Image (spheres, coloured by chain):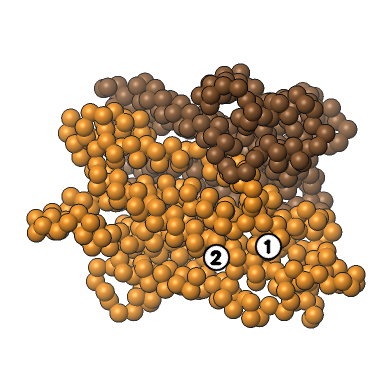
Chain colours: A brown, B orange
Amino acid sequence: MSFILRRLAFYVVAAWVALTANFFIPRAMPGNAVEAILDKFPNLQPSAAKALQAMLGVDHPGSIWHQYWAYLVHISHFNFGTDLQQYPSSVSSLLGETIPWTLTLVGMATIIAFVIGTGLGIMAGWRYGGALDRALPVLTFFQAMPYFFLALLLVDLLGVKLHWFPTGTGYTGGLVPGWHWDFIGSAIDHSILPAFTIVITSVAGWMLQMRNVMVTTISEDYVIAAQAKGLHRRRVVFTYAARNALLPQLQGFGLALGFVVSGAIIMEIVFAYPGIGLLLLSAVSSDDFPMMQAIFLVITFAVLLANLIVDVIIVFADPRARTKEANR
Amino acid sequence: MTTAIPVLTTEPAIAIADKVPGRWRRMPAKAKFGAVLLGLFVLAAIIGPLIEPYAPGFQNPDPALSMNGPGFAHLLGTTQSGEDVLSQLLTGIRLTLELAVIVGVAATALSVIVGVTSAFLGGFWDEALSLLSNIFLVIPALPLLVILLGYLPEKGQTPTIIVLSVLGWPWGARVIRAQTLAIRNRDFVAAARETGESTWRILAFEIVPNEVSLIAASFVNTVLYAIGASVALAFIGLADLNSWSLGTMLYWAESQDALQLGAWWWFIPPGLAVALMGTGLVLLNTGIDEFGNPRLRDASNASRISGRRIPPTDPTPVLSELSANRGRVAAFLHSFSRGSLLDEKGSQP
């Protein structure tokens, strides 16, 4: 357990670094951000202007450490301030509406891509030089594409030209979101194409990583010994080689998560999917700083949490890690 | 800019101990393909200004020339406001490559400095720097880039380059540190130290030359990251929207509904350019990787296959971090890293 606790401590420190950066960046940047924002939103309510000044630390009583403390207290209550664009909605209520969409779509698609990619990687690594292995450069091409560009192509081809899939938003207009079949069916229908995009673009990465670790693992003595013992091939591949190759793969998964999630969020824009990506786009285009900062924190926390889960899985999946844990 | 080709194509070869003639022939086919593909883009970037038929921002006032498909007057068609897509594409390739190469050089230099220093200082400073890079690795870069660029009063090439470089070093630093730790205890380094060479000389002439393939791989990965990140940032509008990078082209195509209007010639070329440059870089890294990692190289010799990696993968899984005797504080810091699970296996208690 101590490893997981230490990792938890690490993520707390990482979260603190993110929070602190988020606090100091607006204060460290040249120019007066408040004035720039107030110019853009001339009919801002006085209370919103005041909240903004407090957030950016202009004309605010108290030392910077006092402000910092107040900021941390606010964040701990999920208070990200008032949104500028959709005043008087709070940033957290707007985020609350979009997070479930992104979490479901990006989370599910990433896990599917990881599982498929790892499986293909095991096969490609075991028979390196085989047909699957030689198909890798083709997949590389899809992976080198920006997510949003592949999304544009797929929407044009499968949505606009062939009418196979709906082309935008999260569900058919007119439906009331809720736990009834009409809505869920429509939501699934709308999420197939975005999910497919994420899987296509990220599967090659996981596959290659796993394939490379497999190539290194299968030349280990214990794998050769297992083969020499005449064990069934399935047992050698999965129990001996793949299981040991899985640990670096999971570590890589944790580290790559930030990239994948960022890419997927940008991709949502193309589909006009009602997730965080669209919120980020509108925040950027209207200089809605409280929203941008809140999105940064939310994505960071999500990635940190996912990494912690990966750590737990590593400990449970890897016998070496488990015995080490027991001996501590 | 012009140095990009020699750096990319010759460096992997330097890593081979026996300098056999015909390095180019010995490169894996996929790496060759990648180098050629990339070379074409570099060429397009260099001669672009000479062959551009129009100025990229020239708006043809004739309304009949708005959103024209590819034709003789405009080889890749025109945009909504009558601009020539081919000219924009050439300018876009130049600006995007320029940005990516500068970021690649700057961020890789930072990674080498941090990685090598960290491994050489050892102990507390090593663990502290590793902790720092692990933190920056785990915080997703894109949203952080968004707020950094969002707050900057002006958005253009230079701010983007600075911000991308500042956030682009941790991955390379991590890999280079691991390699330096492995090399540090080799006999030739000990010999150099015995002969009284200064630490700087050892670093510059003994350590770094042995890491050339890793540094090259790190450079290629950083260029890839810079292209991806800058295009994504421009796509959401965080760039100088009056300049014509590949990302801003995609931004305008998307915001002026090129897709809905069926103007495929407007959004496909820039996206395809990004994808092909990315493919070239990735394939090129295959070659570098196989030179750097003997096991993958053997596999490629045996069956003429190749592997390559995405940035968030350790290109050298063969190397294990040699955990030298850590001080108590350093050991404490190290125990928070994910690697602490395994790499302490062989170390003395």
According to the picture, the residue beneath numbered tag 2 turns out to be B98
Query: Is residue B51 shown above or below B221?
Result: below
Q: Earlier in the sequence, mark 2 or mark 1?
A: 2
Q: Is residue A321 above or below residue A207?
A: above
At 53% across and 24% down in the image, what residue appears? Answer: A63
The disc placed on residue B273 is none
| Residue A84 pos. (x, y %) | 75, 33
Chain for numbered disc 2 = B
Q: Residue A273, image x and y in percent?
A: 74, 40
Residue B115 screen position, x and y as percent: 33, 49
In the displayed image of the protein, which residue is found farthest to the left? B194
> Callout 2: 10 Å neighbours few (<14), some, many (20+)?
many
Q: Which residue is mark 1?
A: B243
Identify the residue shown where x is 45% and y is 65%: B284
Furthest residue to the right? B63
Report the front residue among A88 and B226. Answer: A88
**Does the residue at mark 2 contact the one at mark 1 (Cβ under 8 Å)?**
no
Judged from the image, the secondary structure of the residue bearing numbered disc 1 is loop
Q: Is residue A160 left or right of residue A295?
A: right
Residue at 17% of width from left, 56% of height from top? B198
Viewer-side residue, B274 vs A162: B274
Q: Nearer the viewer, residue B245 or A154?
A: B245
Residue at 39 percent across and 62 percent down: it is: B216
What whole-number distance in Å separates the C-alpha atoms at marks 2 and 1? 13 Å
Q: Is residue B130 visible?
A: yes
